[in-house]
Amino acid sequence: MKNIRKISSILMVMMLILSMGSVFAAESTVTFKGLEEGFVFAPGSGYTDTDLFDGFKNVMPGDKLTEEIVVVNDTEDCDFINVYMKAVAHDEEENPLTYDEAYENLDGKDQAKVEGTRDETVATMEDFLAQLSLKVYNGAELIEESDLSDFVYLGTLVNGEDLKLNVELEVPITMGNEYANRVGEVDWVFHAEAIQFDTLTVKKVWDDDNSKDRPESVKVNLLGDGEVVETVVLSDENDWTYTWETLDDRYTWSVEEVVPKDYSVSYRVNGEVVTITNTTTLIFTGQVDWPVYVLGTLGVMMMFLGIIIMRKKKENENV
């Protein structure tokens, strides 16, 4: 059976920039809009349009802040998405610091607040980030603490569903003035697997001249990539038919019958429908009487032939 895959991986970025000062919070959302548009971030900030951590700006030593990020599946392109996330700190080559460009987007008042950070380097940024404690929760479940360098599975969302991430930032009370106005640039990368459900129908056909030995039911195994996933029973009660409607199309799906005794099996695939035909392997059924009559007739003929031979023998002896 041919399997149609519809998996799309979408990678999008949001920026987390941290510095020391006052605290402001805003609601943040990441919305998956479909295979073409990808993720849409809100509200963004003067640093970057994908900045979801407005509440983590200008923090003070001893601060323990939590910001909620809502991830929404708002697409009709697929049946559900698997969502993953990781954090990637900027570096010297492939992912250079973008703070100078972000600085130019700030108004004069905000530029004055962070003027001392124009000499930020990857080394000073990494040193600053190492002082902080970062935890990410999916509801009450701790997903990861501090290290998000590898993709972490967040959850599965069908159309219209959302999940809430709680990101907790803790700044040590012992952080010194040398870290004032420091900036940490981290790309939060979202990865979505957009998956379309497969359907598969199995139908049962008999080719046995309505044999009285036909079983009342048969078992059919559903195979995902060759492994048995589920077993169903086909009978008159379900018209010898069954349909699976929500099969994950990341797998190749097929069926295999537990073949009844004295029957052979064949499969015919037409799109998403598999027809299973059982043919009887018995040539005859019931009692066969014709050999009795034939053998009986031959026996009578042999008896008469024997009598004739005996008579001729006696006649020859009397001559």
Image (spheres, rainbow, N blue to C red):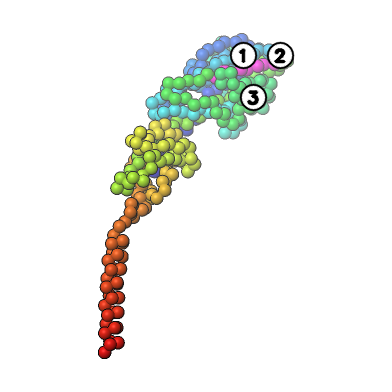
Q: Earlier in the sequence, mark 2 or mark 1?
A: 1
Q: Earlier in the sequence, mark 1 or mark 3?
A: 1
Q: CA distance from mark 1 to mark 3?
A: 15 Å
**How busy is the neighbourhood of tag 1: few (under 14 within 10 Å), some, or many (20 plus)?**
some
Q: What's the magenta region?
A: 165-172
State which quarter of the image contains the C terminus.
Answer: bottom left
- Looking at the image, which is closer to me, 110 or 277? 277
Residue type of the residue flagged with mark 2: Ile
State which quarter of the image contains the N terminus.
Answer: top left
Left or right for 198, reference 112: left
Q: Residue furthest front?
A: 318
Residue at 39%, 39% (x, y): give it. Answer: 217
Whether 241 is drawn above or below 141: the answer is below
Q: Where is residue 199 shown, x and y percent of the image?
A: 38, 35
| Numbered disc in front, either 2 or 3 | 3
Left or right for 20, reference 196: right
**How busy is the neighbourhood of tag 2: few (under 14 within 10 Å), some, or many (20 plus)?**
few
Q: Where is residue 244 shown, x and y percent of the image?
A: 40, 34
- Looking at the image, which is closer to me, 157 or 31? 157
Can residue 117 be seen from the camera position used here? no
Q: Which residue is mark 1?
A: 65
- Looking at the rendered structure, which numbered label has been put on residue 51? none
Q: CA distance from mark 2 to mark 1?
A: 13 Å
Q: Quadrant of residue 144?
A: top right
Element type where label 1 sits in the image: strand
Q: CA distance from mark 2 to mark 3?
A: 18 Å
Q: Is residue 31 magenta?
A: no
- Looking at the rendered structure, which numbered label has been put on residue 173? 2
Whether 26 is drawn above or below 39: the answer is above
Q: Which residue is mark 3?
A: 146
Residue at 39%, 28% (x, y): give it. Answer: 77
